[in-house]
Amino acid sequence: MTGGPDGDVAGNEIKILIREYGEKCKIVGVADHSGCAEDPDGLDHSELLRLVHNNLCIAHFDSSKLSGEGVVHQADNDAGIKARNNMHNRLEADAFVPAGGRPNTIDIHNYQHFLKPDGTPSSPLIVEGANLFVTAEARQKLYEEAGVVIVKDSSANKGGVITSSYEIIAAMLLSEDEFYDNKEAIVQEVLDKLRSLAHMEAELLFREKDNYQESLPQVSQIISNSINAATDALTQALDTVTADEKEKLLPLFRDHLPQTLANLSFDRHAERVPEQYIKNAIASCLASKMVYKEGTKFIDSHPKEKLA
């Protein structure tokens, strides 16, 4: 994994993996700006969580918690920087999760470094928690030459974008006191929505892969394009509806909100939420539901002017 325990994506990924899988999960390497910690027996979970909870980078990993083959490389010397920079290529694992790091780290000029001398990948699965860590050309080459399964950033980290949208609408509808008084319930409801959406995204991704016989990144882009096309068509159509028709569509916006947030504040939406925001939310929700239920070819089979 790239991205440190003090990072939003990597830190939460560490917490989720340990919470959901416990000792079944071995995190064999973590790299960030400060260096990297590696252990083929798996980095100590309690020590990783200590770093996460104290907002500390990986260089603070206690080396006494390593097995005999473990090591912590500090990025304050050339050898440490080199070890950090190529950790994702060297370490063998079931999955590699780029959850931070420089864009285009794996590109068309160096993707071969991710392959072992026999041509097999150091990790057969890449799940892109960070945007743009692997270029499109490198993704395709890794798939074609080594069969690497890559869950593209636009599918893998979509939950972060959705969460940001809920943060915005909560700020519009609730006072600070109201939010903190109900934070636990709202956060749980957002997590439930994210799990449901992630499940639908994954099901569609692998179903469409069978339909198209393409790499997952290509299918992920097809899904994104279909949702965007449906959203655009619905947004344009909503510009033409009457005020009474818009009123009838408001339950879709309410259903989009976490239940506690809706119960507390939906009656304030008219004076606090811009009409365009509501329209965009309705269009986006409907578009996603259409694509997840019917598939991308259903969207492609309809002329844009008739899609809504």
Image (cartoon, rainbow, N blue to C red):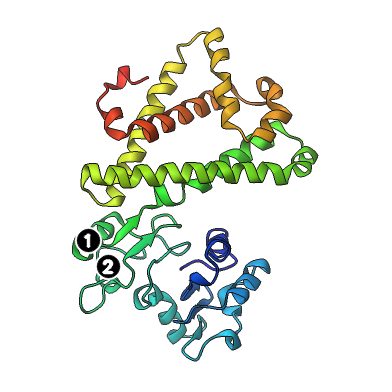
* Quarter of the C terminus within the rendering: top left
The residue drawn where x is 48% and y is 30% is 285
Amino acid at the residue labelled 1: Lys
Amino acid at the residue labelled 2: Tyr
Q: Is residue 228 left or right of residue 5?
A: left
Across and down, in percent, residue 161 comes to 51, 44
The residue drawn where x is 53% and y is 44% is 194
To which residue does mark 1 refer?
Answer: 141
Mark 2 surroundings within 10 Å by alpha-carbon count, few (fewer than 14), some (14 through 19), many (20 or more): some
- Marks 2 and 1 in Cβ contact (< 8 Å): yes
Q: Nearer the viewer, residue 110 or 11?
A: 11
Residue 172 visible in rendering? no
* Up/down of 89 relative to 251, above or below: below
Residue 122 visible in rendering? yes
Q: CA distance from mark 2 to mark 1?
A: 8 Å
Mark 1 surroundings within 10 Å by alpha-carbon count, few (fewer than 14), some (14 through 19), many (20 or more): some
Q: Nearer the viewer, residue 6 or 292?
A: 292
To which residue does mark 2 refer?
Answer: 111
Across and down, in percent, residue 113 comes to 28, 73
Q: Which mark is residue 261?
A: none
